[in-house]
Each structure stands twice: as structure tokens, then as C-alpha cells.
Image (cartoon, helix red, strand yellow):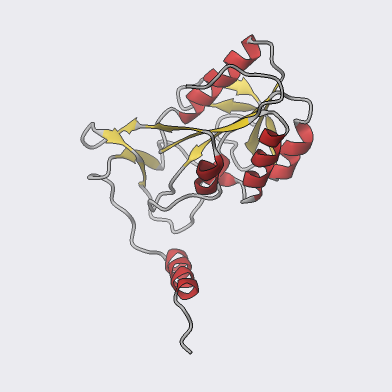
């Protein structure tokens, strides 16, 4: 439950899950309620996401709300100084600076709501989302329906063979899958390199 907003009390809310799980719908619902409460709302999305609109956040079910397009998280900070509520969609596409920006906005007394994928098509934590989950006061995990078996889905299955981590798309490229039906891709050169680097950093040097 989200408490009643009080003056100068800020926090971070994260809405996460796989594709087609209703993250953007829930973000839009919360932002519309804030607007009805006559709170000043600023809404942002990354420049890379132009699937449905360049000046709106749009859900897969065609719900939409006007938004501003930004390249870097610091632009969000600069553009929402007068706002009480800050909404951010597709948080996974921003860099790690997003975490610091959200923390600063919350410390300024603002309600910050971020929606995004928690895992990429490999089932690996995606972008700044894991760290946002750590610092958020409120977390909502949404679920889709597995297209294979009908069980709750938490994984995003890419249906084309492409090793790129980021490919912006919808039902033409991705499906929602449950853990049992999810088919993780073979490790790509990019993924193997990342895994090797983590293992190297974690292994203590011999004396």
C-alpha cells in the first residue's frame, strides 16, 4: 500500500516484470490518479523507445499518456524540479545514473515511479533496475500469461536469433514465458565476456 502523500516526504516506487505484464498500464494508472489529485506530474521515457509514439508513453493495450523524451537521466532531474510526482517508463534502457537521479529526486520530497523490465531476454538482471529495486520503498512485480502453457509468466522470450542485448520491439519479437517454458539462449560472445569478467573480478589473486 502506498501512503497518503505528505509535504516534503519523498520515495521511490518500482514497477517491474516481463514484457506484456502490464507495467506501463500500472504506471499510467498511478500517474493519472496523481493528476486527478491535482499534483504536478512530470513523465519521461528514453529516446530509444519510439515503438508506438514519440511524445506519449503507450502500453501494449494502447493506454497512453503524454511524456517527454530524454537521452540521459540527468535531464529528468533538470526537468522535474517543480514537480511533485515523477514518472519514468522503460527504466532498463537508461544507464546507472538513473539510480542516483531517482534517489536525489526522492530526497527532494518527490514521489518517483519507475517502470521497467527486471530481466533481459537471457533472464539476466537488466540495466539499472536491480539497483533501483534495492533503494525503492515500494516494489510491484507484475506477471504476464505464458503463451505456451497459460501459467503466470515472469520471463521475456526473444523469438528471433540476435545476440544484441537491446532490440526494441513488441509481439513481433518477444513472448511472455513462465520459468518452465522459458528457453534461455545460448551464451553469446557478449554474455560470455561479461560472465568471464565477473568471475575474474570475484576470484582473489594468488599470493
Q: Quadrant of residue 179?
A: top left
Q: Residue furthest bottom?
A: 207
Q: Quadrant of residue 85?
A: top right
At 55% from the left and 20% from the top, the residue drawn is 3
The answer to whether 182 is drawn above or below residue 191 in the figure is above
Can I make out residue 146 in this image?
no
Can I make out residue 124 in this image?
yes
Q: How many marks?
A: 0
The answer to whether 73 is drawn above or below residue 193 in the figure is above
**Picture coordinates of residue 78, whole percent (x, y):** 79, 37
The answer to whether 95 is drawn above or below residue 25 in the figure is below
Left or right of 126? Residue 46 is: right
At 58% from the left and 14% from the top, the residue drawn is 33
The answer to whether 120 is drawn above or below residue 58 in the figure is below
**Picture coordinates of residue 99, whole percent (x, y):** 62, 45
Q: Quadrant of residue 58?
A: top right
At 56% from the left and 30% from the top, the residue drawn is 52
Amino acid at each position: 500500500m502506498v501512503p497518503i502523500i505528505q509535504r516534503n516526504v519523498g520515495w521511490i516506487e518500482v514497477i517491474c516484470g516481463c514484457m506484456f505484464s502490464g507495467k506501463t498500464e500500472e504506471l499510467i494508472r498511478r500517474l493519472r490518479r496523481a493528476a486527478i489529485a491535482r499534483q504536478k506530474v512530470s513523465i519521461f521515457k528514453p529516446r530509444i523507445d519510439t515503438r508506438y509514439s514519440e511524445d506519449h508513453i503507450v502500453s501494449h493495450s494502447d493506454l497512453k499518456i503524454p511524456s517527454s523524451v530524454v537521452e540521459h537521466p540527468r535531464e529528468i532531474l533538470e526537468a522535474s524540479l517543480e514537480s511533485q510526482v515523477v514518472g519514468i517508463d522503460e527504466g532498463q534502457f537508461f544507464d546507472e545514473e538513473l539510480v542516483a537521479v531517482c534517489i536525489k529526486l526522492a530526497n527532494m520530497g518527490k514521489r518517483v515511479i519507475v517502470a521497467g523490465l527486471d530481466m533481459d531476454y537471457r533472464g539476466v538482471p537488466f540495466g539499472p533496475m536491480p539497483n533501483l529495486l534495492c533503494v525503492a520503498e515500494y516494489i510491484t512485480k507484475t506477471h504476464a500469461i505464458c503463451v505456451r502453457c497459460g501459467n503466470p509468466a515472469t520471463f521475456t522470450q526473444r523469438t528471433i536469433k540476435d545476440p544484441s542485448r537491446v532490440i526494441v520491439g513488441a509481439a513481433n519479437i518477444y513472448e511472455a514465458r513462465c520459468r518452465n517454458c522459458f528457453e534461455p539462449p545460448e551464451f553469446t560472445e557478449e554474455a560470455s565476456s561479461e560472465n568471464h569478467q565477473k568471475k575474474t573480478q570475484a576470484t582473489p589473486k594468488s599470493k
